[in-house]
Amino acid sequence: MHSFQIHSIASPSSANIPIPKSQSKITGDSSPHYSPRRREDPFSDALLSLRRCTATGSPKSGSCQHARVLKLGIETDIYIGNSLLNMYSKCGHLKDAHNLFDQMPHRTVVSWTSMMSAYLLAGDAAAAAVLFGRMLDLDDVRPNEYSLAAALQASASIGDADLIGAFHCYAVKFELVSDEFLQKCLIDAYAKSGMFEAAEKLLQKLSSRDVVAWTSVISGCVRRGYGERSLEFFCRMQEDGIFPNEVTMLAVLQACSEIRSRKIMLLILGFVLKGGLCKCDLVLNSLIGMYSKSGYFVEGMLAFSSFCFTNDGRYTSPETMANLVHGCAIFESGEIGKGIHGYVIKHGFLPCVVVENSLINMYVKIGEEYSAMVLFRTMLKRDVISWNTVISGFVKIGRPGDALRLFAELCRKNCNEKISPDFATVLASLEACSELALSPQGRVIHGYVVRTGLLGDVFIQNALIDMYAKSGKVDSAESIFAEMGKRDIGSWNSLVAAYGSNGRATCALKALFRLERSGGVEPDGVTFVNVLTACAHAGVVREGLAVFGSMEGRYGVKPSVEHYGCIVNLLGRAGRVEEAERFIRTMAVNPGPDVWGALLGACVVAGDVGIAERAAKELAILEPDGSAWRVAMANVYARVGRWAAAAEMRAAVAAEKKEGGWSSVEVGGKEMRFVAGDTKCTERVDAYEILSFLKNHMKDGSSIYYDHFSICC
């Protein structure tokens, strides 16, 4: 983020190596005064060749020059040695630089600084700091401002504030702190380590505060997550009369992305336009990314269309295009997304995995799964994110069977494409198994999780509990929960939901009390929704009302509309529809469609037309185009024999021409879909015969009293 980099620290001494006077007039072949009869000095020629290799970043040519130096026998010269060390350092050949450094008969401060720079360029800041400590133990070599600057950068990289302070003291003791370059390095190191007060003090003492010094402090604040403070320094920078450069604006735009203030973004946009900084591709990409990452999709698209269609060679990066496509997916702007798809094709962004993954996600979100699959199948290269995008996308749009088939295909292709399912793949696949209640496939995925070592993840374990619960395997869900080393609130909620969905209300209540005694984890709103739902399914009214009454006082959870809906469902299932209606009238919040829908559903069983009509009247206001409440109202009329009114409601539903609901069951590994009154199934006669048998069997056993509290957990 800064205009100075560590590889330039050694350059004042290593790149501009002084040449003896007798050799300083030697010129290269390109000089107009060159005479072919004049012999070149091997020493100067080697130095110039090494400098060219360093400038062009050619380690192969540099190695050839190294061999030439060895052949000439001048490798012991300190200038030659430092030039070779600098060349290997800048070319990223740390091992060669290290070997050369160990073999040097004499080392100057330039040698030590070049080696420290090599470690820093390789990302080993700790080794650079250790090397500086070794240099301090020497009597014949004293660090200068450039070696100290390298040590400061190493300390800032490892986040050692005490070490930075010690180096600062060293600079003061040996009168190096007056160097302006070193002062800026100190400011940068303090800012990167989060010591903003120290950085600010040095900044105020600086005789010439330029854009580099201010940018160091601003970038340090952004790096540590202090976006608002970075903007404060940015404003003070303006008061100091310093105009920002591209590096400054990159840091400020990142801070705006974290703060997400539309007003501040508008002000920063003014700085970008005023200074002509939008001509910089990096600033342009950050500007568009600032809007798209902050949720201001329209503003991001305006910035994109304003600057990227001028035919002046300015184009966004693939990551920026992926962010824009992602925004189209979030806001379901399919037409804009298709336009961006055309733009990336026209300007040669494809093939690009990042962009293609975002496009696949966008097409799935807008309901064009076919386009998503065409793009997925035509990708030249796919990564695990590509597979995760289509698998999770199909789960979210209600096609879990297709998601599991893709998961199986990914597992088969693992050997060829070297792509293995990861954490996100397993979560999406387990969710698909939960949707279809497919315990055999879920057990296979469970085995894969155990084999790959993903079982220790709490999210994977929670998903396994949910999958087994929805498949009716409560014992397996309990086993997963019991073996968990660490449980979060999601783990407890999954267990309570498992008990509730399988009619084990007493176990759900006991789990709530166990959660209360466990310590460290507090029940939340979801916990009580699951407990109240379990009580409603089991008909445990008294206990359910007691739990609802203790939510705010005992657990500090304020009831929401969803909790009120659970109580209405609880009372309605018990046939207490009048009490449920009175409860709705006294609610502390405005009842929503779910609350009135629960009451109307209870009226279907109770056959109370009056309450049902009042509930339907409320639903007609809240959901004028809804069909579910009309179907329920038609069932109420049919229950009491008002066939004309029921037919009228059914006709209103039929006029909307909405797609009917369907169910599915897996038989022999194949998903079978069917609708109510289905006549297309070849085995419909046998199916209806079995259904009739089950109905009669349930009627015969309806008089049997079943005590829910006798269930042993």
Image (tube, rainbow, N blue to C red):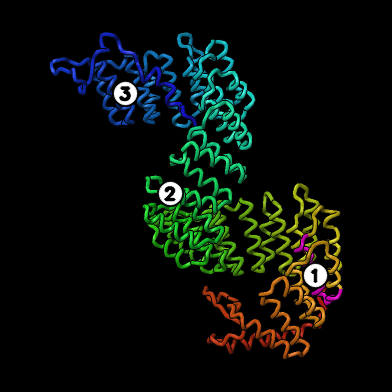
Find out whether the residues at labels 1 and 3 contact each other: C-beta distance under 8 Å.
no
Q: Is residue 606 above or below residue 644?
A: above
Q: Using the image as rendered, state which of residue 401 and residue 30 is in the foreground.
A: 30
Where does label 1 land, which residue?
568
Where does label 2 land, which residue?
308
Neighbours of disc 2 within 10 Å: few (<14), some (14-19), many (20+) = some
Q: Is residue 234 above or below residue 616?
A: above
Compute the Cα span from label 1 to label 3: 82 Å
Mark 1 residue type: Val
Q: Using the image as rendered, state which of residue 267 and residue 169 is in the foreground.
A: 267
Q: In the rendering, at what x and y percent does residue 708 appear?
A: 81, 71
Mark 2 residue type: Cys
Q: Using the image as rendered, state which of residue 637 and residue 51 is in the foreground.
A: 637
Of the numbered discs 3 and 2, the one sitting upstream in the chain is: 3
Q: Is residue 461 above or below residue 266?
A: below
Quarter of the figure with the C terminus: bottom right
Say the numbered circle drawn on residue 213. none
The residue depicted at 38 percent of the width and 19 percent of the height is 14
Find out whether the residues at labels 3 and 2 contact each other: C-beta distance under 8 Å.
no
Drawn side of residue 203 relative to residue 112, left or right = right
Secondary structure under the numbered disc 3 in the rendered image: helix
Dominant SS of magenta comes to: helix
Of the numbered discs 1 and 3, the one sitting upstream in the chain is: 3
Of the numbered discs 2 and 1, the one sitting upstream in the chain is: 2
